[in-house]
Every structure is written in C-alpha cells, then in structure tokens.
Amino acid sequence: MTGRGAAITTTGLRKVFPKRRPAENWMDAMPQLVKGLAGRQDRKVALDGVDLKIEDGELFGLIGANGAGKTTLIKILACLMRPDGGTATVAGYDIHTQRMMAKASSSVLKGGGWTGVLWMRTVSQNLRFQGEMSGLAPALIERRSAEVLELLDLTDKADEVPWYLSAGQRHKLTVALLFMVRTPVVLMDEPTVHLDPNVAQTVRRFIKETVNTKRGQTVLMSTHYLQEAELMCDRVAIIDQGRLLACDSPSRLKRSVYDGSIVEIRADRCTEPGLEALKAIHGVTQVRARLQDAALGRQSIRIYGGNGLNPMAGALEVLGAAGAEVKWAKSAEPSLEEVYLKLVGREIN
Amino acid sequence: MSSIDAGSTGLAYQLRALSTFVRRDMKLWTYFKVNLLVDLLGVFSNLVIYAVIARFNPGGEGMAAYNHDYVAFVVIGLVFNTLLSTALSGPYMGVMDSFWNSRLEVLIMSPVSLPVFTVGLSAGQYVRALFRVAIYLGGGALLFGLRFPAGADLPAAALVLFLAVVACTGLGLMAASMIYIVDARGGSDPVRLVVENLAGVAAGVYFPVQVLPVWVQWLAGLVPHTYALDGIRQALLGGGTPLPTLPLHRLLPALSPVLTDALALAVYSALALPLGWAMFKRGLRLAKVDGRLSRWV
C-alpha cells in the first residue's frame, strides 16, 4: 500500500435485479408477463448501499459466497453495468460522468471463463489483438507479448490456437490478455477458480509479486477461497446479500471476532468420547474437529479457550487419557473462515 | 506510475482500432479454408442460377426501364442486395458474435468509442461482402456477358448506393437494439424478419416491381431496398432516360425517377439512422442496467 490516495471509491452503491425464472409453459408465462408489465416483478437486491475505499497500490480482496454481490460490484466498477443508486470512482474518474477514462484506467479478468479469447487465432495473435484494441504501440505489443508469455509459461504455445490448449493453459491465456495492458486498476473476478493447484499458485504469485508489488497496480479481486484472500490481500471485505459486513486487514479482522486462545491439535485414534471430554475442560468455549483419516481415526481439532485461559495443557491431558496419540499441538490464530462464519452465520461453501 | 500505460483514446487510436476489427474478422473468415471456398462457390453458383434463367429471355414485362437486360438487372440486384444485407445484418451479427463468444465485455471495456465499436462490429462483414460483389461483377462480366450501356450515370448510382447503405444501417441498428430491448439473442429479430422478407419478395432483387400487384408495390415502398435497386438500375442501365417504375414515381411525375429514389432514400436515412442509433444506445443502456450485456454472470 502506498498511501497515494484512493484508487477505487464507492458511495452508497445499490443494484437491484428483477428475479428471472424461465416460464415452463404459456400458462406459467402469463402471470409473469402481467407482473412485469405492472412493474411488480419480484426483485433481488444485489448491492445494498456499498461504501468502500481502496487505496492506490492496494491488493484488496472481496470475499463472499456465490450470489453475494461480488461480480455485480466488479461489473459496475468496470462500467459493464449501471448501478441503480450511489456512485463510484475508478482511478479518480466517476463511472457515471467520466466513463471513457474510468474504462481506460481499469482492466478486468473473469476467472474460469473464456473472456476475450479469439478461438481461431493463435495465442500470440490474441495478445496482439488485445494490445491493439487497448491502443498500445506495435513495438510495445511485441515486447509485452513476449513478457507475458514467458511469465505465464506459454512461450512454446505462442503459435497454437486456443482450442488445442489445456484448460489451465487457456485460463493462463485469459490472464495473459489481461496483463497485456497495464492499467492503474485491475479488477479480477475469482481469478483462480477452476484452476489446478499449480496454475492457481502461479497466477497468485504473478498477481501479488508482479502486478501489485513490482508494478504498483491496484488490484481488487473477488474470491470465495478464504485462504487465498488471507495469504494475498492487504485488506479484505466480507460481502453477503449485497451488504459489506466487515472491511479490514485479515489479521485485524481475525482479532476482532475472537480474542481468546486457540489450540490446534492433530491426533490419531481420536474417539467421540475424547472429543466430548475436550468440551468439558474448564474455559473451553468451542471444539471443532475435522476427520482427516478414518482408518487412523486422525482428527484435526481446534479448541477455543475463553476468559484468558489457554486450553493447551488440559487438552493434551484429556486426549492422552482417552487413548489418542497426539501428533502435534500448537497455538493458533483464528482463520478468516471463522471470521466469515461469525459474521455471516454460515460457512462460505 | 511509470509502468502504467497511458490511456490512448484519440482519433488515431480509434482508426487503428477500426482496422484491428477488420483484420480480426478477415482472419476469422479465412481460418477455415474449406468453409471459405464453399462460401465463395455458393456466391458463384447463385450467379450461375440467374445467368441461366436469363437465357430464357425474361427481359419482357417491366424490363423497359432497365434496357431489357436481365443479366445486368439481376447482377445489380445481387450486388446491392449483398451490400444492403450487410448494412442490415452487420450490427446485429457483430453484437451476437461478440456476445456468444464472450468478447463483448472486452470490447465494451476498451477505450473504443461507441461509434467505432458499432462500425467495427460490421466492418469485417463489409469486406467479406466486397469479395462477394467482386465475384458477382467479375463472374457476370467474364462468363455471362455483363455490360453496362453507354450513358450510365455513375455519380447518381453512387449517391443512391450511399443513401441506401445509410438507411439500411439505421435499420440494422434497430435490429441490433432488439437483442436487448426484446431479448432477441437467439439469432433472429423482428426488424430483420420484416425488412428481409419484404425486400426479398417485393423490392425487386430478382424481378421488376411492376410485375407485382399495386398494393404489394406500395408495401415494397416501405423498405429502402426498393428505391435503391430501382435507382441504381435506372442510373446504370436506363441509358439516360429513366422511366417511372414505382408508385412513388407516378405520385411525383415532375421529378426524375432516379431523383425520386434518391429523395426517398434521403428521407429514409434521415429518419432511420438517428432512430436506429438512439434505439441501439437505448438497448445497450438497458442491458447495462439489468445485467444482460454479456454472458458473464
């Protein structure tokens, strides 16, 4: 974060969609038509007064489940959709009154899709088209193409057409198209969705190290991978049903929802009575266990202590008495998943 | 921030973007060589069909205004129907192609101005149309004796063609607006349905309008193709003495038929282009409001 001012601001941003359901037959379609004509269509609030300020050079994560409003917010900032209320600026340009400059100041990536790919042109021709449409000089297009191809390990695919590429390589191509142009603001809608772990890691590293840190571009990325947001982002906002529920750095968010002690234990031969006994330890407020290996009875256990009590010693004693074999135990921080659960009231996936 | 590209949105950029559209479409068109060959052979076989019909001497009723030359009559009809169909279908097909191939958001997000975006969507189709036109004219001249008589009024023909393309572009923009105004994303729309059928049946592409019942002739007057085809044929084939062939010509006997055609097209253009442009912008705006602009959901 450079503190050079706001790259993105939104004020009271609001968006409401009519609820659409395909009619099953004419009898079903008529009431819908009448409701539509009478302006009484059912509506869904996608964004409900979103106020947000993202600083210049920040890597900002937008966390939310499917349908929370992440994509709608990104589309509005990309000038692909008009809000019903409120306003926003991108790189200082108002999305209502300075649309052309706002558009020229941002680029957008739609994760898991085929945005912008020309099927019947080679990878390098695709990159050239993107560069030309973005107003880059020919020499810069050549240089930039070579650079993004190398960065994304696509150099040997430069002369192939996209439909002969693997799904991961095609996704890399959409990322490469995005990075042909260096705009002050980069908007990414779930950039690693549907990617295999290796490609996802490459894309994450590229976004964090090259785009954000080296080039200083402001990144707004939406994701429902909480660990991804936690590892990459300077700040995150949690959005649900169109409302921003919280916005802060991952560490402050985690502290804000839980200030007690957390112990994380990995143990084999862990039985139900043993887990029940953990809950009975003095000062323990919650125990969450996840079975990792049924054959070994291996559990990953998180134990939450309140009132300033550290439940580590008590937990090891109880598990030992229950016949469990503790592999390791450590003090832990709350995770973003727990922050999300606390704020939204349900798990993200 | 030195590593950030300066936003380029000026005239030079807009012209470069337009040429990029054309080159892109040409690459897409020529990628599948067999399809390209079949496409061009289809154009040639269409020409052959009408040239063969011409051997049965259909230069009788209603052909006096066109020098009784059916080959020239039908080649001009095919050529200008190709160009006018491109003007009519170009914007709709361009938007639909970008929409279904998930490229629309990239184009809308680029700093291309809306007029360049709109022209760019059909620019490549015009280049394709010119190849077809070349086959009609070249094949007609080389194989079927297509000749234009002395005294052909080329400036008048060019004026009529220009006005007709403008008028059809207005209708084409109306057709493209239907994608979002009435959700016509399935490949057909009500505007082209009406105009193409009326033009195909009654505007005189394949036979003179005079052979049709008078009420159909009046109906044909609702599409610009009718005035365009008549005006161009009379300018090129009429030998300097155009004859009244359409109901509007008989309504305005003081004016030369070619001038009447040009005036009708000018009025049509003055109404259709601004209306089409307003509807196209309205359609895009509606799509941005209700989130249907692209396939990105």
Image: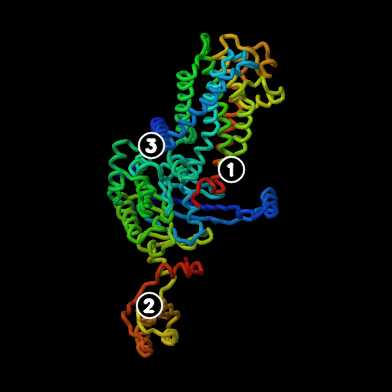
Q: Which residue is mark 3?
A: B8
Disc on res. B184: 1
Give the secondary structure at mark 1.
loop
Nearer-the-camera pick, A236 or A307: A236
Q: Residue at x 47, y 18 (%)?
A: B141
Q: CA distance from mark 2 to mark 1?
A: 54 Å
Q: Residue at x 50, y 28 (%)?
A: B45
Q: Position of residue A85 (x, y in %)?
A: 56, 50
Q: Do the numbered discs 2 and 3 sit on residues whose CB atoms are within 8 Å?
A: no
Q: Nearer the viewer, mark 1 or mark 3?
A: 1
Using residue B186 as the reference point, say whether residue B6 is left or right of it.
Answer: left
Q: Do the numbered discs 2 and 1 sit on residues whose CB atoms are within 8 Å?
A: no
Instruction: Reply above or below: B283 against A30.
Output: above
Q: Residue at x 30, y 43 (%)?
A: A144
Q: Which residue is mark 2?
A: A293
Q: Quadrant of residue B106?
A: top left
Q: Do the numbered discs 1 and 3 sit on residues whose CB atoms are within 8 Å?
A: no
Nearer-the-camera pick, B239 or B33: B33
Please name the amino acid that badge 1 sits on. Ala
Please name the amino acid that badge 3 sits on. Ser
Q: Residue at x 52, y 45 (%)?
A: B293
Count of picture labels? 3
Q: Position of residue B86 (x, y in %)?
A: 52, 31
Badge 1, how many Cα within 10 Å: few under 14, some, many 20+?
some
Nearer-the-camera pick, B199 or B23: B199
Q: CA distance from mark 1 to mark 3?
A: 34 Å
Tell which circle, 1 or 3, labels the residue nearer the N-terminal end.
Answer: 3
Q: CA distance from mark 2 to mark 3?
A: 57 Å
For mark 1, name the chain: B
For mark 3, name the chain: B
Please name the amino acid that badge 2 sits on. Asp
